[in-house]
Amino acid sequence: MPRALMFYRYYPFLKAMLEGCGCEVLASPPTNLEILGEGTNRCVDDVCVAVKVLFGHVSRLAREVDAILVPRLVSVEKRKYDTFTCPKLIAAPDMVRYSFRHLPPLLDFTVDVARAPWWWSCVRLMRRLGVPLRVMPHAYSSGIREQEGYDGLLRAGLLPADALSRMYNGNGTSLPPYLAERDVTVAVVGHPYLLGDHIVNKRLFHWLDAAGVRVLGSTMLSERDLDAEEPSLPTLSWSYERELLAAASILMKRDDVDGVVYLTSFGCGPDSLITEIVRRELRPAGDQVLMEMVLDEHSAESGVRTRAEAFADMLRHRKKAYASARRVP
């Protein structure tokens, strides 16, 4: 499984289910500059950096595995109106299939809940692998349990990469330092694959933590939280962007959040619309400040560090100024 795109959302479920079917699941290593460079060279120019990272991970896995699983996420929720995901998520298996000359068999895990429930997508995948019918219920249940454990770590505030590391590498039980109480709290809103990949986000969370900031990720919000916020927001057919809009709205209303960073990748069409809605239509409940950060494969880590440090300093200055103003009789 390539460590890209919705890997950071569904990997625990897919890993446990496939292992329950008797498969050995190999995830590509965390993104590095070599993988990013390989993906950039193989992919077309006019897609976001997250898709280019996918190509780099596929290239890394191509000679190590018997098959590569690339999800095709068409519709992930059923509503009274049509819903979709990003066009690149829908076309990801095809983009990979026609961009590489020699690949192992590509397992096209198609999810389209507008036409068939999630479990049917899993059954189709297991049938493709030749799994006996009697094994399927147990494998599916194993995936559900593993996903619930992962979601619980996300709800506790861990970022996707840290939650996965804790589950599969046994990296401690204490909370990461970026969740410690600090004088300033910053919430970062973005897709899981942006929050989870330190090469793509240029170690934004490290630099915010180093600046003495408590950091919250939008992945900590539950589906129930996001659905409760939806009635006050514009109707969107893009499911994952609807979640980001709801997350931004929730975090901009929290009293314990001083600033919000909306993280997106250059070339993402749906996100370009959502950032405009966030900037123009959402109003902070208090003194929260919004900063947009658009990144691509050419972004420099030094620039992200400078912006993170400047943002933290500005928030501290504002808090001190407001505290002084309130003390004046």
Image: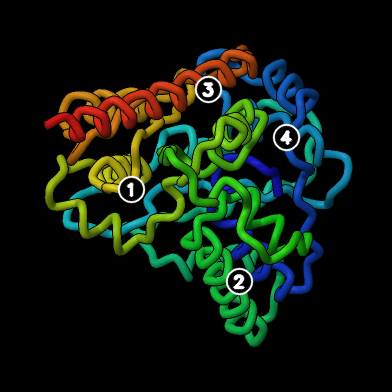
Compute the Cα span from label 4 to label 3.
24 Å
Amino acid type at circle 1 is Asp
Marks 1/4 in contact by CB < 8 Å: the verdict is: no
Amino acid type at circle 3 is Glu
Earlier along the polypeptide chain: callout 4 or callout 2? 4
Please tell me in which quadrant of the rendered image residue 63 appears.
Answer: top right
| Residue topped by disc 1 | 256
The image position of residue 35, as x and y in percent, is 76, 28
Mark number displayed over residue 31: 4
What is the total number of numbered labels drawn onto the structure image? Answer: 4
Marks 2/3 in contact by CB < 8 Å: the verdict is: no
Circle 2: element type: helix
The image position of residue 297, as x and y in percent, is 62, 17
Earlier along the polypeptide chain: callout 3 or callout 1? 1
| Residue topped by disc 3 | 309
Front tag of 1 and 4: 1
Mark number displayed over residue 143: none
Circle 3: element type: helix
Pick the front one: 110 or 321: 321
Q: How is the image coloured?
A: rainbow
| Residue topped by disc 2 | 146
